[in-house]
Amino acid sequence: DFELVISDNASTDGTEAICRDYAARDRRVRYVRQERNRGPYPNFAFVLKEAAGEFFMWAAADDSWSPGYVAVCLEQLRRHPRAIAATTRCQFGSSACTYAGDRTSDSAFALIRRAHFLWDPGPCAVLHSLFRAQVIKRLRIEEYGFNAGDWAIVFDLLEYGNFVVDREYLGFAK
């Protein structure tokens, strides 16, 4: 019950053959090869635009999750209808940490959510979250390709609601 959109950002290794093989075996997998490297944020924006589901999640080369990650995030979003995204605690490199969204409040006021985030954004951002697609698609992701652009995305998303963070450590980043 998902779609996987792969945007090969002009890789120079065996990515194309591997992805085409998966796409040929599973109709839920759609592979698109970019003619040139678009850079990370335009590539992220492309995948977001192509996605058709109610929920959306990015997966970069250095991301990995425990098998139950998506199910836990989906349950959190169903349990919290005002939340715009859900994630879990993560293991970041060699240390455990919480996501920046863990420090936002569930306030009905965007100003308070944003103030909590700015006061203590935490050691890592939340682009690994499962998002409500209609909310994340409001942003022009390709315009965030600057230093700390991921934190700017979180800040702008807090206009629309909060992030729910499950207490389990199911996410991993290098």
Image (cartoon, rainbow, N blue to C red):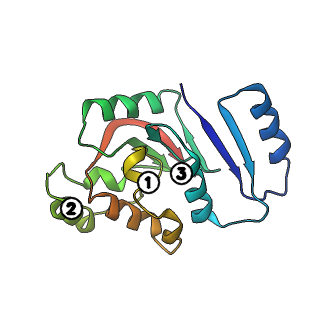
Q: CA distance from mark 3 to mark 1?
A: 7 Å
- In this figure, which residue is indicated by the disc labeled 2? 116
Question: Residue 166 in the image: x percent, y percent?
Answer: 33, 37
Question: Residue 97 in the image: x percent, y percent?
Answer: 39, 50
**Which label's residue is closer to the chain start, 3 or 1?**
3
Secondary structure type for disc 2? helix
For the residue pair 110 and 135, the one nearer the viewer reads as 135
* In-image side of 1 versus 81 (left or right): right
Give the farthest residue toward the bottom: 146
Tell me if residue 104 can be seen. Answer: yes
**Residue at 15% across / 61% down in the picture?**
112
Secondary structure type for disc 1? loop
* In-image side of 91 versus 99 (left or right): right
Question: Residue 114 in the image: x percent, y percent?
Answer: 23, 63
Residue count near mark 2 (Cα–Cα under 10 Å), binned few <14, some 14–19, many ≥20 = some
| Disc number for residue 137 | 1
**Residue at 23% across / 67% down in the picture?**
119
| Disc number for residue 48 | 3
Residue count near mark 1 (Cα–Cα under 10 Å), binned few <14, some 14–19, many ≥20 = some
